[in-house]
Amino acid sequence: MKRVSSLCPLCFALCCWQAEAQIYDTNNDAVQIFAGSGFSGYLDGQGTQTMFNNPSQIVVDSLGNFFVLDSGNYRIRKITPNGTVSTFVGGGHSTLPGYGTNVSLSDYGSLRGMAIDHSDALWVATGVNPANILKIGTDGYTSSKTNGLWYADYGSVCVDSANNVYFSDGQGNRIYRYRTNGAFEVFAGSGNQGSQDGNGIFTSFFSPAALAADAANNIYVFDFGNHLIRRIAPNGDVVTVAGSGLVTDADGQGRSAAFGKINSMCADNAGNIILACGFSSSSSVRKMTQSTNITTLAGSFTQNGYADGPGNLARFSGAHGVCISTGAIYVADSSNQRIRSITFNPPPQIVTQPTAEVSCLGLKQAS
């Protein structure tokens, strides 16, 4: 599927979109509903007998409980492993700081990125400029922090193994780090618009958006304006690892792959990066291995919609948030008002080759 333009080649590369080769994962991926009725609204309850309003992010704590950034309702919802949905924070009238459902989150503009740290505290980026960063404890105590500089145009959040929190500044073209001692600092990016690799502030980004931290404390950045995935090592070294820079979706190896838009990213225990991708006309969940091979787990580069089933037949409409729990991937499927799961069923592996045997009928192959 291509969209033809009469613009100059540079404008075409920056503004237009085309869908390219899609390579599906081979682990018998299957998509199904975890929570949400598909109707937009606000209703706690069990599994599919619940309602969300544009769920945009999802994370999981150390006990297997999920937390959903229910953006349209200005609430954070909690889902237990058995699918019971309740309201954790928001919907009240009190200003911050405060507790749980007593507080109002609507005073902080749009709710952008969300991450969970290793003490199970939630971190939420808001759209007020300069942006506020909300910290929510396991008891629901919610407080607000800001450095007075950071802007959340495409704001995303991730946390490393030491509980340092990273925020992308889409307007300022920087990645900030909030240390456990309370200090804000620029982790990477000069503030100049560009795609220069290097170290720390001697690098450039163009509207950095989705973030993820792996087990080795590498920070992955979807550099939205450049349509690249960049990796920042713990020492601040920035390297471009994937993406052709074209405004398109294509699976493949490293720089031969392409990303029109990545809404959210997370890392699994094997070092794979899971990507929730999509434009208004397409939506998919993809995987980048440590060797930067990119494949599709589920969804389509050319369609959105709603369908459960095998990965190549499943459809999303706004795969926006993504997290991993007990080997399954959970997706905040925003426009479908649902939380979906992707499970895997690898085919049986032959560990011992069959041997021939002799019968009265002659030589035959053992089954």
Image (cartoon, rainbow, N blue to C red):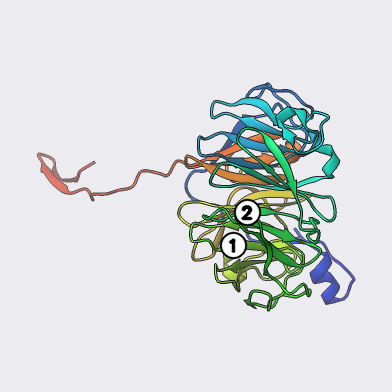
Q: Is residue 103 visible?
A: yes
Crowd rating for badge 2 (residues with CA inside 10 Å; few <14, some 14–19, many 20+): many
Which of the two discs, 2 and 1, labels the residue nearer the N terminus?
2
Q: Is residue 272 above or below residue 241?
A: above
User: Label 2: which residue?
Assistant: 158
The amino acid sitting under disc 2 is: Cys
Do the residues bearing badges 2 and 1 touch, measured as CB atoms within 8 Å?
yes
Q: Is residue 19 visible?
A: no
State which quadrant residue 42 falls in.
Answer: top right
- Residue in front for this viewpoint, 157 or 273: 157
State which quadrant residue 311 falls in.
Answer: top right
Q: Residue 206: image x %, image y %?
A: 76, 69
Which residue is at 54% across, 43% downward?
Answer: 119
Q: Residue 267: image x %, image y %?
A: 54, 53
The amino acid sitting under disc 1 is: Ile
* Image disc number at residue 229: none
> How many numbered marks does the figure carry?
2
User: Label 1: which residue?
Assistant: 219
Can you say which quadrant of the picture contains the C terminus? top left
Q: Residue 135: image x %, image y %?
A: 68, 44
> Mark 2: which secondary structure?
strand
- Residue in front for this viewpoint, 314 or 65: 65
